Image (cartoon, helix red, strand yellow):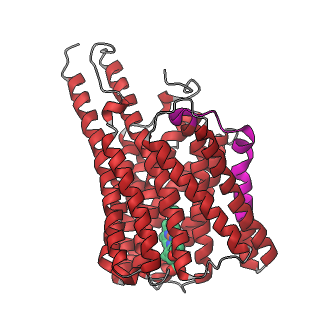
Amino acid sequence: MIPGSSDLHFDRMPRLWVPLRAFLVAPFLGSAGGLLLVFAGDAAFSSRWVPSLLAATHLVTLGFITLVMLGAIVQVLPVVTGVSVPSSDWVAPASQLGVAAGVVAMAWGLSTGLPDITRFGTILLGGGLGLFIPAALAAAWKTRRNPTGRAMGLSVLSLLAVAGLGVYLLAGHAGWVPLRRDLTDIHAAWALGGWVGLLVMGVSYQVVPLFQVTPPYPRIVQEYLPAVGFVALVAWTLGRLNRWPVIANIGIVGVALTLGAYAVVTLWLQTRRRRKIRDITTDAWRTGMGSLALAGLITIAAVAGLVDLAEPKLALSFGIVLVIGFAVSVVQGMLYKIVPFLSWLHLQNVLTRHNLVGQVKIRNMRQLLPVKGPRRQFVAHLIALGLLLLAAWLGGPWVRIAGLALAADFAMLGWELLGVVRRYREDEEQIASTPT
Ligand code: HEM
């Protein structure tokens, strides 16, 4: 029995490949984002509106972060709440395919300026997410009494806003509708604060105590924080759209305080770990939570007029801290637990199916993912983060160097995860070839 797992519904897990396919493809799309910076060079960092930067940003945010999160929802929701995403056996692969192919077309269309390819990307992304969102919302509605289910529901509602605005903005780049740049910040805030921030919160209520062996999150954090963050985002959006500066400021400070408080609570829980062995997931989450708290401070400083987030170098650094420092670090750390854990759990099922429990020795989680590779990859991730920040301020050849470091960071992650699957397959074959 896994500590803290007694209330989990492992019998409701989807088939292994339903989430795993997304987890394995995602790092290579992120890596493509780094390579795009290598090709585009200094020009990519000259302003936030450069199409090649938007393309690279989405290879990371949609191709890596969102693809993994789509896989995590179909996996975590049924295990935590017992409620599966309806028809996940075909909805999940179809929506993953739509997002993966759509982001490649989006990046290709934007960086080459070919509107037909951009239009194709718009349709694929709209279709992929359009398929996933109603199914996930239906499942989340049934689980609204569970804090993780509720946070996931609010996060998927945020994804609805992100996808709606994103598709409209991309249609603007493709020449279908006028490009409404006043909507870009709203799209980005719902993406990073709502979709990513609230989902990380909901998932962490389960995975931080389970995998990092911490005490549970305080009840008040689990019950109320995601809803407060969501309401603050609504207030900020209404303030922005209607030009009510006081409401907008209250809203954005509310978002920063909610996410900042969540980050501080997570860092505090990590100091109270019952098992103090150093591990990559904890290090990655520390980096993620430190970055999130820093982004919260910068936001509040900007509202107080102490810094100017319209200044291009600061705006770029702020985006890097949030996307690479917070979201990518946390998702990488989560993958290093979820992929070996799922593989191990499915191996147990294979043993049971073959009536060979206790008769064939299979690898444990540490043997499925030896620690040395992830350690090297985490160092590469920190180097990529540092170089991207340097490139934001110095530009020039640093952009290409940082792009290369980012490509290596993701490729190393992909390699480590493929290694887990290779070892899983070896054990599975060993079980299949053992006479019962
Ligand atoms: C259907 C999916 C999506 C589409 C079609 C889409 C499309 C776009 C487009 C076209 C822009 C540029 C707008 C402009 O030129 O003013 C943009 C900006 C942005 N998007 Fe998305 N997006 C999607 C999902 C996401 C997701 C899931 C995230 C993050 C998790 C994200 C993060 C951002 C950010 C941070 C910006 C602002 C970039 C900047 O200002 O430098 N997007 N999006």
Q: Quadrant of the C terminus?
A: top left
* The quadrant where residue 355 appears: top left
- Residue 397, given in percent of the width and then of the height, sits at 33, 79
Horizontal relation, residue 319 to residue 124: left or right: right
Q: Residue at x 57, y 23 (%)?
A: 6
As for residue 374 lying within the magenta part, the answer is: no
Compared across the picture, whether 240 is left or right of 83 comes to: right
Q: Quadrant of residue 425?
A: top left
Nearest to the observer: residue 363 or residue 393: 393
Q: Is residue 224 magenta?
A: yes
Q: Position of residue 255 (x, y in %)?
A: 70, 61
Q: Quadrant of residue 409?
A: bottom left
Q: Quick check: 182 above or below 388?
A: below
Q: Is residue 436 visible?
A: yes
Viewed as shown, does residue 336 lie left or right of 267? left
Considering depth in this image, is 357 or 34 the residue closer to the camera?
A: 34
Range of magenta residues:
209-234
Q: Is residue 346 above or below residue 300?
A: above
Q: Residue at x 43, y 79 (%)?
A: 394
